[in-house]
Image (cartoon, grey):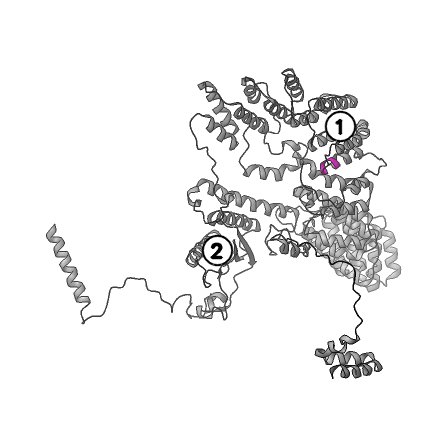
Amino acid sequence: MATSLVRQTKLLSIVTSQLSSAACFRNIHCTAACLKNRAARIRVAKGDKPVTYEQAYHPHHIGHRKGWLSQHTSNLQGEDGAAERVVEDVFIRRFMYGTFHGCLADEIVIKRRGNLLVICAVMIQKLLPSKFYFLIGYTEELLSHFYKCPVKIEMQTVEEKVVYKYL
Amino acid sequence: MASSCSQALRHHVCKSSRILRVHLQKAWPNRSFVLNPAADQQPAVSSPEEIVIPKKKTWSKEAVLQALASTVNRDPTASDYRFQDDPYLTPKTSSEFKLFSLSQESGRNAAKYFISTYPKYFQKDYAQPHIPCLMPETLEAQLEEVSEAALIERIQMRKVKAAVDLYDQLQQAGTPVSLDVTNQLLDLICFYGDCDPAQENVPEQRNEETVGQENKLSHNKRSPCLVFSFRENNNAERVFALLSEPNTHSYSALIRGMVKYGAYSKAFSTYTDLLNNQLKADVSTFNALITAAPEVKEKYNEKWELIVDLLKQMAEQKVKPNLLTLNAVLKALRRCGTVGKSQAFPVISEMRALSIDPSLASYNHLLSIFYKPGHKGQTDILQEVMNEVSGKSFTPQDPDDAQFFITAVRICLDTKDIEQAYRVHELLGVGENWRLLGNDFQQNIYHARFFSLLCMMENIDVVLKWYRDLVPSVYYPSSNVMRDLLQALDTDNRLDLIPQIWKDLKQLGHGNRQTLVEELLTLMAREKQNQEVQETFAECALDIKKMYDTGDRGKVMMSWTAGSLSDLVSVLLAAQRRQDAWEILKLFKTHNRVPSEELLDKFLTCIKESGDVNQALELVQISAGFCLPGTPKLIQRVQQEFLLSEQQK
């Protein structure tokens, strides 16, 4: 058993020495690749794919032609908690996507005012209003208890998804 | 130099016109103060008064917000704050209002169920300072062993049956339970009437649905045991009997429980036991006994004597009465007929002397004593009460406070007193009084009565102003109230507003109520209006016809009557819509209704104007088909007024 271990360490040292030798400059890739030139962009296709305003404009248009989907103050100088806000936002988006399944017309906008968390959503008129209110009451209560802060939903409905262009 | 310059200027200015002076002053704003140099100014008269520096005001942290909030009034175009601000999601009828608010509430209850079933996912506490209401509730008792602490825990969680079982176990095991804990247990049993309160979710929904029937049994509202009667061997008496030395608190709990659940004579016998044991009763016991007094005696005098007796005993035992005592006495006096009327005011003045101020509930009982429904009395009590009450802000101190506004507006409706109604409505706007209007059902009653009174008494402009203010943001009127509104329109001769009211009726969900629709048609058909109004009437009439035809699933179908059909035809004829009227005439046959003679006469006159001979003949044939007695006259008229060919004769 000791001999096999010794053999393994010898192998590893050979491999690393080979890798760091002048002949090859490829190193072990330890982090995930962030493809910054492919994120949040819908590529131009045949012309039959409907796309909303939010989806049509790429991330470099944020601040110019698009607004922000998540509004909080933790990115200001001297404020902390940015990472926690991001995690909360991701959870809330997935939660809303699953709870109001098939009804979301566009991305959710999350605003934080003091202690209050406001979730602004545009929905398609797929469900009866009473069912919408059931889900609104459920979401508000559950998220309030989960994040220990008052959560309010401001909802707007449209008849069908608003298409900006076809890509 | 400056002063001489200004002197010259002043001469110039005085000589020239005022406009020039203003112009100069405007042109040289930075020298305006030079125009009045110190030399020219009158020496200031030194006032002998002292300058009083006011005390520094301290404002609360929310003062700015409150000042801003006072500038904003209710938005009459918005729906209730509970609902989302979207046309698809705003309720348009009162049933939708109830449905949406209930579904939102049930969503909350579903979330609460998940939170209490899986509390471990909700334990992480982000909030600083700690918010206790957002932490999961523990619904199961933690302590399992048979001990006093476990009993206390079950009492606090309001688990009546579990607490009683544990108490029995403790007794069997021989452990002595202290008097305080036993008193708490007695309180629990007597308050909940020996059965468990249902989970939080259920009573709220039941309250919404059954609050109409439960209104009368107001003190039993929260209990699901509506017809609970103090059975012979119930737990309260059993636990009480097991007490070796019951004290005032135990007797009090038992008596109040008995009175709450209708065992009045038992309550009085328990009270005599208390006196025999040389114990003193406390205020709430006396309040309960006074409430029970009208139930145990028959005649008005006897009831009043019993109450007076109880009050005297209260004075003997040196127990100070409180507001609830006053309200209990007044409520009992409601059942005492004429004695009540004579004794009510002395009671109030005596209580005032003891510095107990009447609350809205006392005024409510007072009004009910003097204004019995169905009686025609001449009293100014309402005015005096309103004088007392106007401008004051009340806090809820008694459960009956919520009845005041409804009673007051009912009295205004019965006595047709519009000024007092305005004062009552004004009182609602003062301070916190809006909280005392009650739940949705009671608010609906209040607004219905207020609006009916307005329709009866005020002219149409005022009525419409209130209509636009209240409907539909605060109040969804029922079909009776809408009929009152139609009558008000009729009285003031504003029938041209009928098409708008019809649109509102459709939106409120009253578009398929037969009586209302027929009344609408009759009003439109009664007189001939001018041309544009007639056009709008015709559009409205055709719309109404659509309501008769389309029958959605679940909607109540209306059936045509002869009257409604003839009204419809007359409206269309008056607007010169002969083709539509002709089709409606055919409907008579399909729905087995008989048209009247005047209708056919009118139709003939209309046809004559167009000169269509064939239609005239068809009309005659129709009337012959119905075997109307007026057919020969019609035939005569047709022969006289039309040029007929040989064939047609």
Compared to residue B138, the image places residue B107 above or below, namely below
Identify the amino acid type marked 2: Gly
The kind of secondary structure element at disc 2 is: loop
Task: Pick the residue in front: B448 or B328.
Answer: B328
Label 2, on which residue? A102
- The x, y position of residue B631, in whole percent, is 84, 51
Start-end of magenta stretch: B357-363
Q: Alpha carbon of mark 1 to alpha carbon of mark 2: how far?
A: 61 Å
- Asked whether, in this view, residue B604 is left or right of residue B241, the answer is right
- Asked whether, in this view, residue B590 is left or right of residue A143, the answer is right
Task: Pick the residue in front: B561 or B470.
Answer: B470
- The x, y position of residue B221, in whole percent, is 62, 34
Compared to residue B322, the image places residue B40 above or below, namely below
- Name the quadrant of the N terminus of chain B: bottom right
Q: Which mark is residue B335?
A: 1
- Residue at the (14%, 53%) spot, across then down: A5
Identify the amino acid type marked 1: Arg
